[in-house]
Each structure stands twice: as structure tokens, then as C-alpha cells.
Amino acid sequence: MDRMRYEMDGKVARIVLDDGKANAMSVPFFEELGALLDRAERDGAGALVIAGRTGMFSGGLDLKLLPTLSREGLRELSATFARTMLRVYTLPIPTVAAITGHAIAGGAVLAFACDRRYAIEGRFRLQLNEVAIGIPMPSWMAAIASSAIPPGQQVAALLHARAFSPAEAHALGIVSDLVPEGGDVVGHATEHAADLVGLPRDAYATSKRRVRAAEVDRVLALLESELAG
């Protein structure tokens, strides 16, 4: 089942998550996202927008699936989750999240892995709820989230599972801009992504790698031991 649409708008690639529900994440979800990241790179996209459906960016991992997984299946899901989010975080072109609604747990991580975030106003939550539901936060997730959340809010967001409304996230600098309710946040994000297309591709890719490589290497070195725990 296709959970995503892929579109090209000029030099901007766009991946729209839409499973008709919560855009729940699973190994097939990550495999499909990875294949579309490959496609954007093959197409020579100058920037990438990742969007959700109306009212829902993503609710994170498929919680109905988790209790059915074996220990090995859970390990595979966790490793694929980590490596896919780190792939988005290090993608060698500018990435922009169009937060169309709730972005919770893994959904928030996906938004934080992008270089910029634009959100629609409304009664939505942007939240890392891992600690609140009894899941220790992995180092890789903390690294991605810390790149997007101001230092003064990191304890509240990462350790105390604070939920931010779109307006609060904008006021704190977690999202770059707000679109009024009923507006076109995907179009708004695409316009801003188009502004980034003109950045020299090689310089951008090399600079992004240099800015993030040491931290990514650090968390990848910890991944196997944290999965075992």
C-alpha cells in the first residue's frame, strides 16, 4: 500500500505522507520514505519538502504494531527508524517540513530532522512523548531534536515531554513561520524551499556534512548498544 505521494514542483521535490489516518511509521513506511529520498536525489532536486495530510503530519510509530513484534522485529524497526531519520537529517539538499497537523513522537522527529519547519495554525501538538510513555530517548533522537529546539526548551521538550502548539513552537523558534488556519502550508513550505534551490549544491552538501557529521558518527556508534538495552 502506498503511504506517500511523490511530486516535483520545478526543482523542489515533495513527499506527502498520507495513509488516510495517522501516517503511522513502520518498517514498510521507512522503506518507502527511503526509496523516495533516493528518487529525489536521482531527480537532481534542489530542495525537498516533506508534508503530511490535512490535520496530521505523523503520529509516530505504529503503536498497534509494536506489541505484535518479536524482539528481533522490534530491533529491526528501531534501527530502521534511526537510520531513516538520520538520512533525512544529513540529506545533501535543503529539507523543509510542512507541518500540516499533529507531529507527535516519530512525527516530531521527522519534522526536526528537516532544516526548516513551517506549520499550520490550529489545535495541534508538536511533541516528543517518549519519556511520558516509558521509552528512554535514544541518543540519535536527542541529537536531531536538539538541533531544532532552543537550548532553554530542551529539558522541557526532551525530558518532560512538553507538547507545543504551533503558535508556541513558532514563538520559541522551533518552527520558522505559521500559516493561518485554512491556509496552504504545503504551498508556503514549497515557496520557501524554492528560495533555497539556488544555493550551490556541492557547497551546501559539504557544509551540512561538516556541521553534522561528528554528532551523527557519535550517535551511530551508540546505536547498537542502545538497541541491545
Image (cartoon, rainbow, N blue to C red):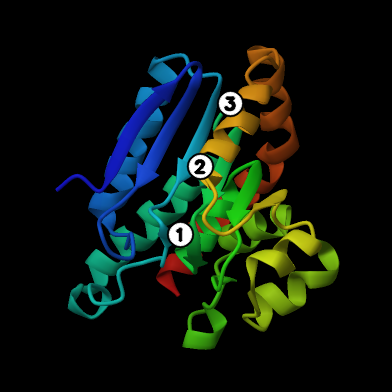
Q: Earlier in the sequence, mark 1 or mark 2?
A: 2
Q: Which residue is mark 2?
A: 186
Amino acid at circle 3: Ile
Q: Which residue is mark 3?
A: 93
- Which quadrant does the C terminus fall into? bottom left
Label 3 – label 2 distance at C-alpha: 18 Å
Residue 12 is left or right of residue 163, and the answer is: left
> Looking at the image, which residue is at 75% across and 76% down?
155
Marks 3, 2: nearer the viewer: 2
> Circle 1 sits in a helix, a strand or a loop, which is it?
helix
The residue sitting at the right extreme is 152
> Circle 2 sits in a helix, a strand or a loop, which is it?
helix
Residue 150 is left or right of residue 197, and the answer is: right
Mark 1 Cα within 10 Å, few/some/many (few <14, many 20+)? few
Give 172 or 152, whichever is nearer the viewer.
172
Label 1 – label 2 distance at C-alpha: 36 Å
Residue 2 is left or right of residue 194, and the answer is: left
Q: Which residue is mark 1?
A: 224
> Circle 3 sits in a helix, a strand or a loop, which is it?
loop
Give 135 or 105, whichever is nearer the viewer.
105
